[in-house]
Image (cartoon, rainbow, N blue to C red):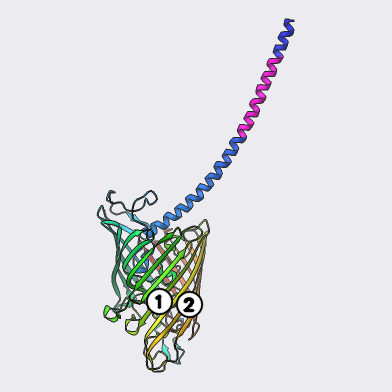
Amino acid sequence: MIQSGARNLKISSICLVVAVYSGATAAATVTEQAILERLAQLEANQSKMEAELQKRDARIRELEQRLAPAAGAPDEVHTVSVAPTVTATNPIAVSKTQTPEIGRFNPGGGGYTIAETPEGSVNFAAWTYVRYLNQKALNKDYTDSFGRTYDLNLRNDFQVNKVNLTFHGWLYDPAFRYLLYTWTSNTSQGQGAQVVVAGNLKYRFSDALDVGIGIDALPGSRSMYGTFPLFLKVDNRTMADEFFRPSYTTGIWSSGELAEGLSYKLMVGNNLSQLGVNASQLDDGLETWSGRIQWLPTTGEFGPQAGYGDFTWHKDLATMVGLSATYSQEDRQSQPGTEDINNSQIRLSDGTRLFTPDAFNTGGRVDNAVYQMVSLDSGMKYRGFSLEGAYFWRWVDDFKVDGDIPVDDLFDHGFEIQTSYMFKPRRLQGYIATSKIFGEYGDPWDAAVGLNWFPMHERLVRINTELLYINKSAVGYSSIPYVVGGDGAVFNTNVEMKF
């Protein structure tokens, strides 16, 4: 009986051990499944976090560009600035209590820090390029819409086309900023506006209200909204953009960010293009205004300065839509010269300047006119590819004439399309650009194919080569490859530096 009890006890013990082992195995299986599920959840969370970090990094790059004004021209003044106050979400702003740092390099065109103290900062930036231009393949003359024939001055030369030296920073209050610059156009040696010394002052009240006064770009097209000089081309736009756009003037403006990815700029100025025009040439009215609203619906950014081309290689689809409008009452004596820096002339679509005496070959002269222009543009960037375009509408009317002219008003419209691809990220970019004007005095167009090589993997230095074809160009002056009336091929190569 004792043996039987012992045997039963042994059997019971074995059963207990088996039961415990089975339960442990089942528990281990459940635990393993839970761990796998947890790992899957963590991986999903990590992927989501990485996506958010990419979006945040892109946003930070955009903020850095807005905080650091680029070197040189007025249209390099960023239209939407970020409050220069240190916060948890704005760690890159200047603090009035931080340790002074001299000689720091500021990426994105911000240049080098010369001085940084609790009372203010001074930064120095520069931009320049050397161009080889060959226009020898163009026809030697052209005939305008009124039967007048002109000889063309064709070029084949090297030029240090422009030099921009910029000082920018803040004084006493980081919200109060200044931009002072010297801007030369070496192709206009001897002209009255070969050198411009100018600038502006700005004070930031809030994200949505950044007020400036001084010389700045009228935001009448996308290329006039802080994208300069981040063009696919070097320092020139398509023919249609050059023909329709306003230019730079002295005035007052407000810009800001109304919501994430939604920005604006409104400006009241002296005229369409003041560089090279002295105060005594202006009338006694402030009758020029321009405004733009821009929306970045998908990623909330469009690369540094919302420039052209996808140099930064967007991993997510970035999109942009913009609408601009400009109104100006113009008079004959307030027009800039044909060689004044980055001028904007009101022209007929055959290139004839509206305010030229006997412009219509009828003996009459236009003394006053009203210019109105609207542009609608959009673009997308994805993994090195970009597709960007714009449409322009322009009305010129309310003429005051000395003598007779054959029209009461003018209406011209046109478009531009630009596409590019980074064949090697941050190194080699190819692009195609074309535009056309549908005008009352001809339908000129242009097309270009080019390569941009960035030897230092940054936009600070690039070598550009472009072959341009123009058909009866409606624009032209010596600092751009176009010549008025030009018909044929133009070749240019540029070496550009910007820091």
Measured in 3D between alpha carbons, the distance from the residue under mark 1 to the one under mark 2, in whole angstroms, is: 12 Å
Neighbour class for label 1 at 10 Å: few (<14), some, many (≥20)? many
Q: Position of residue 81 (x, y in %)?
A: 37, 60
Q: Tag count in the figure?
A: 2
Q: Is residue 391 above or below residue 358?
A: above
Residue closest to the eye, 31 or 186: 31
Residue range corresponding to the magenta coloring: 11-32
Q: Is residue 64 magenta?
A: no
Q: Position of residue 147 (x, y in %)?
A: 45, 92
Q: Is residue 61 above or below residue 360?
A: above
User: Does the image show residue 455?
Assistant: no
Left or right: 165, with 89 as reference point: left
The amino acid marked with disc number 2 is Trp
User: Does the image show residue 205?
Assistant: yes
Q: Position of residue 456 (x, y in %)?
A: 41, 58
> Residue pushed farthest top?
1
Q: Which residue is mark 1?
A: 327
Q: Which residue is mark 2?
A: 393
The amino acid marked with disc number 1 is Tyr
Residue ID at (29%, 70%): 198
Task: Quarter of the image for the C terminus: give it.
Answer: bottom left
Magenta span: helix, strand or loop, mainly? helix
- As drawn, the label of residue 193 is none
Q: Position of residue 431 (x, y in %)?
A: 50, 68
Q: Earlier in the sequence, mark 1 or mark 2?
A: 1
Neighbour class for label 2 at 10 Å: few (<14), some, many (≥20)? some
